[in-house]
């Protein structure tokens, strides 16, 4: 569906409750811009059940998310479960701290509310790949498995959203004018920017201050590990971590995992790995105006497997499926924690959903 066909389409604006608490002024500004350009219905679902109900009764309204990366992920997850993800493009207006909207920036969405709202109203659609696991979960950007012993999720810091009994969604109606992969090895350190291995504290308040607590790693999108420049910083972190008395890694010896991509074995349980990371290639070139169509059509995920030794070789491959198995491992998908599980398979679904991004110049 082109931007011309969606220009006059009514909108269902889903506001994450956290967005109103973090930056209510940006939410108000974004809502005013949207209401000035389209017929808008606003919903503030307080839990997963309310989100499911709101989206299943949206009719012809195009969904728009006001919130952080987690809010976008939950809406896409719900639409995927309802088998409605391909029906309409999804709009996004990022509201949150720098670390909580890293995926939105990588997707090419402006972080300024007026610019993002105008992109929703007059932008163009971009087809995006989706990573779907064998339990029905979706990944919009990437995932990673740290080489640490698995820990069960803290119920107070996990991905589940809890609400008070009886909490529901508040809705408002507004008029149109109302207020077989080829593996490559990376050898040795290379100069580059700081990067962030995945961390269970990726969304903690300390990440807003630039550092993941207890890790010594600077905050930022962990998928920068998959860039050649990022491997140098990773190697230096590893070198410090494996020295006697060093702190920062819970288990510097790595985790015993079996890693397969498209049926090809990359790592087995007799050789521990320090990190397994994967990123959808649709993130490459996003917002740059070049390479987007090719990336979306490719339907590939870039996988990185890092050994525990700082001077070991890092395998980087492009594939369509990724299977990881072990005695029990936790993983971080779009900065949401999951697990521990014994095995999980992720498969790329090419052009599975559409995102409204700013119009090309």
Image: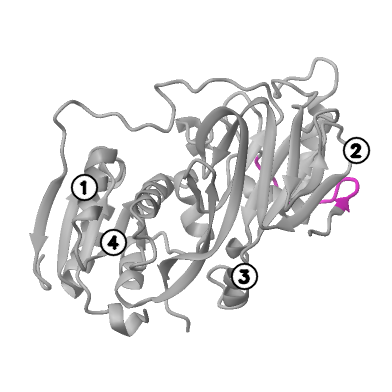
Image coordinates for residue 73, horizontal then vertical, percent: 42, 49
Is residue 357 at least partly visible in the picture? yes
Sequence order check, earlier mark of 2 and 4: 4
Residue 193 lies in the magenta-colored region = yes
Which residue in the protein does label 4 denote? 63
Hey, which residue is sitting farthest top in the picture? 245
- For image coordinates 54% across by 59% down, the residue present is 106
> What range is drawn magenta here?
185-196
The N terminus lies in quadrant = bottom left
Give the CA separation, mark 2 to mark 3.
32 Å
Q: Residues within 10 Å of mark 4 (few under 14, many from 20)?
A: many
Q: Nearer the viewer, mark 2 or mark 4?
A: 4
Image coordinates for residue 8, horizontal then vertical, percent: 22, 79
Sequence order check, earlier mark of 2 and 3: 3
Sequence order check, earlier mark of 2 and 1: 1
* Image quadrant in which you'd find residue 240: top right
Sequence order check, earlier mark of 3 and 1: 1
Which residue in the protein does label 1 denote? 53
Sequence order check, earlier mark of 3 and 4: 4
| Mark drawn on residue 295 | 3
> In the shown orientation, is residue 154 left or right of residue 213?
left
Give the CA separation, mark 3 to mark 4.
24 Å
């Amino acid at each position: 569906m082109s931007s011309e066909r969606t220009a006059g389409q009514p909108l269902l604006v889903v506001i994450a409750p956290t967005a109103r608490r973090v930056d209510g002024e940006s939410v108000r500004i974004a809502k005013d811009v949207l209401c000035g350009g389209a017929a808008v219905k606003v919903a503030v679902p307080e839990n997963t059940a309310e989100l499911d109900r709101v989206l299943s009764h949206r009719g012809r309204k195009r969904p728009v998310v006001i919130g952080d990366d987690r809010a976008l992920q939950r809406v896409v997850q719900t639409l995927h479960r309802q088998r409605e993800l391909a029906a309409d493009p999804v709009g996004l207006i990022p509201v949150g701290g720098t670390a909580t909207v890293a995926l939105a920036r990588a997707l090419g969405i402006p972080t300024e509310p007026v610019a993002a709202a105008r992109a929703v109203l007059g932008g163009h659609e971009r087809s995006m790949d989706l990573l779907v696991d064998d339990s029905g979960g979706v990944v919009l950007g990437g995932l990673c498995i740290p080489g640490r012993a698995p820990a069960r999720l803290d119920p107070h810091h996990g991905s589940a959203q809890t609400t008070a009994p009886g909490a529901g969604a508040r809705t408002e109606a507004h008029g149109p004018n109302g207020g077989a992969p080829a593996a490559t090895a990376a050898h040795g350190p290379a100069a580059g920017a700081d990067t962030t291995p995945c961390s269970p504290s990726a969304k903690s308040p300390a990440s807003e201050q630039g550092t993941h607590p207890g890790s010594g790693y600077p905050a930022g999108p962990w998928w920068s590990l998959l860039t050649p420049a990022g491997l140098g910083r990773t190697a230096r972190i590893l070198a410090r971590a494996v020295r006697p008395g060093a702190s920062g890694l819970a288990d510097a010896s790595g985790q015993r995992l079996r890693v397969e991509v498209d049926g090809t074995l990359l790592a087995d349980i007799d050789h521990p790995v320090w990190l397994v990371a994967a990123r959808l290639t649709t993130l490459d070139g996003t917002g740059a105006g070049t390479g987007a169509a090719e990336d979306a059509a490719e339907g590939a995920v870039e996988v990185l497997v890092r050994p525990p030794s700082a001077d070991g070789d890092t395998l980087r491959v492009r594939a369509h499926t990724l299977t990881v198995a072990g005695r029990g491992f936790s993983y971080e998908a779009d900065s949401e924690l999951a697990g521990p599980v014994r095995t999980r398979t992720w498969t790329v679904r090419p052009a599975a959903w559409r995102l409204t991004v700013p119009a090309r110049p």
